[in-house]
Image: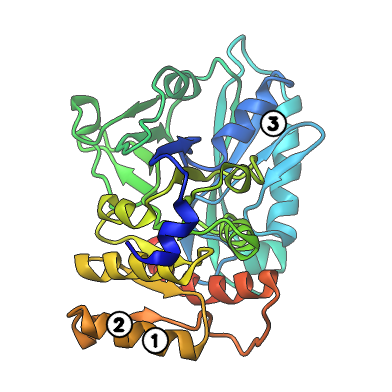
Amino acid sequence: MPRAYSGVLSGLKRCKHEIGYPSRMIDWLNPLKELLNRRPTAVVVTVIAVDGSVPREIGATMIVSDDQETGTIGGGNLEYSAIARARELLTEPHSIEPHSIECQRVALGPSLGQCCGGRVELLYERVSLKSCWLQALAMQPVDQVSDDRWLFRCLDSLESFVALPTDDVARSIELRSCAGISQAGDDGKRWFCQPVRPDLPDIWIFGAGHVGQSVVEQLSLLPCRISWFDHRQEWLSHRPELDVRRVLTDAPADEVAAAAANAYFVVMTHSHAVDFDICYAVLQREQFAWLGLIGSITKRQTFTNRLRQRGIPEGLIEQMACPLGNLPLRSSLPSIIALNLAAELAPLWHSNVE
């Protein structure tokens, strides 16, 4: 163990403790449940199909109540008219079961005067806590490690269910690899299907100092799952409202082996010695999507020389990003470093979360 690392950890009991277990379910589900605890009904507006240039992707969702909106389907006249229609649905008379659905195809240019020029199809669902798929999700908590269940909603009836794609109830539906409309094999009904726990990139951030705080805050705005590592519980406990897996550990390099093969690693701890151990552990495993190290060109050269001495191949060393960021922003301000890092990372996984 390097002397600098040993000194930092002297007197600490070797430990590992995880604080919080984020589910990263479809990101509108918890706001919907919170709203329905205060209101009897709400309308979920979802983009279920797109063609051409449109403001949001399939699966974009907005929740509308009588006095508020959460989420967005793209803004502009599309969203304005969707909110108006949703509120009409909230005031229309319904049966004892306050659940209804409606699909609407919209040409953005001719109908709404938006210059995007594309077309979207929207699903409007008036729901309550008694709605079948909401009850099904509440009865089946999301596993913290992996969850392959999908939410199936029929566009031609009020049928809905939550199941694995391999379950008998789901096999007749021709699933796509991501959220979208699928056909049922037997009766030809249309179903909108989406994973309950989207396949998001895993970002492992080592270091909970001032820069680490800003990085976690910035990346929490993006579609990803964040694991955050440090040996100081008081620093890891900052911003408790963020959906982040927090791991208190005095051996961060030992954690690397448990990451997925396509994980992204961001290294910015309190110690260059600790940083080196983590980078060495990542490069040794060879399987990773990206490795970023905070520091200067001098730090990169120092690490490069030491990694060569440890036998790491030149091709792997070249994959280590340092300094971080690809924007022409030269600042040591934590918020600017975080913005620069986000600008470098987001394009790398954008194609995986469309």
Q: CA distance from mark 3 to mark 1?
A: 64 Å
Q: Secondary structure at mark 1?
A: helix
Please indicate whether residue 240 sits to the left or right of residue 137 in the image: right
Q: Residue at x 20, y 65 (%)?
A: 285
Disc sitting over residue 89 in the figure: 3
Q: Secondary structure at mark 3?
A: helix
Within 10 Å of disc 2 (Cα), the crowding (few <14, some 14-19, many 20+) is some
Name the front one of labels 3 and 2: 2
Q: CA distance from mark 2 to mark 1?
A: 6 Å
Towards the viewer: 335 or 219: 335
Q: Residue at x 24, y 36 (%)?
A: 165
First-in-chain label (3 vs 2): 3
Residue 210 vertical placement versus 295 (above, below): above
Within 10 Å of disc 1 (Cα), the crowding (few <14, some 14-19, many 20+) is few
Does the residue at mark 2 contact the one at mark 1 (Cβ under 8 Å)?
Answer: yes
Query: Could you tell me the amino acid type at mark 1?
Result: Thr
Q: Which residue is mark 2?
A: 306
Q: CA distance from mark 3 to mark 2?
A: 65 Å
Q: Which coloring applies here?
A: rainbow
Name the front one of labels 3 and 1: 1
Q: Position of residue 255 (x, y in %)?
A: 33, 51
Towards the viewer: 170 or 219: 219
Displayed quadrant of residue 286: bottom left
Q: Which residue is mark 1?
A: 302
